[in-house]
Amino acid sequence: MIQAALTPVERGILFILMAHSQPLKQTDLQHAHGLSVKKTHRLKLEDRGLIQAAGKRPFTLTLTQKGRAWVEAELSAPKQKGALGLGPLRTVLGVIDELTKRPGQPLEDGQARNGSGASPAGADIREPEWIEADELLARALQDISVFSAALSRLREAAKGTLEHEIRRTELSANLVFQNVRVAAKKRGLDLDGAVGSEASFDPVFFYSDEDIELGAPVRIRKSPVTRGQGKKKVIIQLGLAEAIHS
């Protein structure tokens, strides 16, 4: 008997549990991630051995070894032929894959070692593995807007013929993006400026394929990713800008 494919909600449960690396209450999935977990979702994942549920309402859900293996297989799956515009999504999945394979402690323990558990914004983090993880997260944050724009163009081009599949892709992508935003927040990373807005060109914050003078007006195509505020602000990933021609 062929098992029914996992729904976007069921896939989201597994991704979120993997991203948090700890058991979560069913209500946490609703309040923190907007994921409405029904009894049928929980029982289906339990029946397949992907999660364990303990306690009474609200149930506490734990990712099993089989569930972790399922997520890892999803993250390492080859790109499907014809998956137009899904490159950024694969990048995001790759970021989560990289983070889950980091040696040592969970994501929360990579914050500044000041004993307070506070956000690492402005901290001088020099561990090579965390520098690399931050760069991967930064690129993923930038690519969220790229993917969303590509999906919008795909929806317009399809004109309703692939509406159901596009919607499923959008739901799955939003769950993954939400996990990336959670991880980025824990690392104190922020997008500096909105895509499409205007700014003054500064090579410290932006790169461009054009020859643009310092201070010239530009339009943001990819937002810079920074950590910290004011004089403590650190550039994690350069943004992309294009000149505004009068």
Image (tube, grey):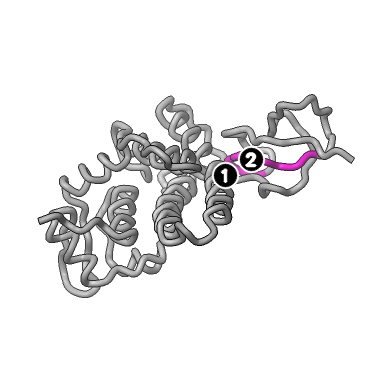
Q: Is residue 56 above or below residue 118?
A: below
Q: Quick one: quadrant of the N terminus?
A: bottom left
C-beta proximity under 8 Å, tags 2 and 1: yes
Q: Residue at x 52, y 32 (%)?
A: 124
In terms of image quadrants, where is residue 40? bottom left
Q: Residue 161, position in %: x, y?
A: 47, 59
Give the prevailing secondary structure in the magenta stretch. strand
Pointer 1 residue: 146
Q: Specify whether residue 33 is painted magenta.
A: no
The region drawn magenta spans 218-229
**Tag 2, which secondary structure?**
strand
Going 45% across and 56% down the picture, which residue do you hit? 166
**How far from the left and from the top, in percent, is residue 169?**
42, 54
User: Which residue position is annotated with label 2?
Assistant: 222
Expressed as whole percent of the image width and height from the top left, the position of residue 131 reads: 47, 30
Task: Please tell me which of labels 2 and 1 falls first in the chain.
Answer: 1
Residue found at the far bottom of this picture: 57
Amino acid type, callout 1? Val
The crowding category of the residue bearing disc 1, from other C-alpha atoms within 10 Å (few below 14, some 14 to 19, many at least 20), is: some
Residue projecting furthest to the left: 1
Q: Residue at x 22, y 75 (%)?
A: 57
Numbered-mark total: 2
Looking at the rendered image, the quarter that the C terminus falls into is: top right
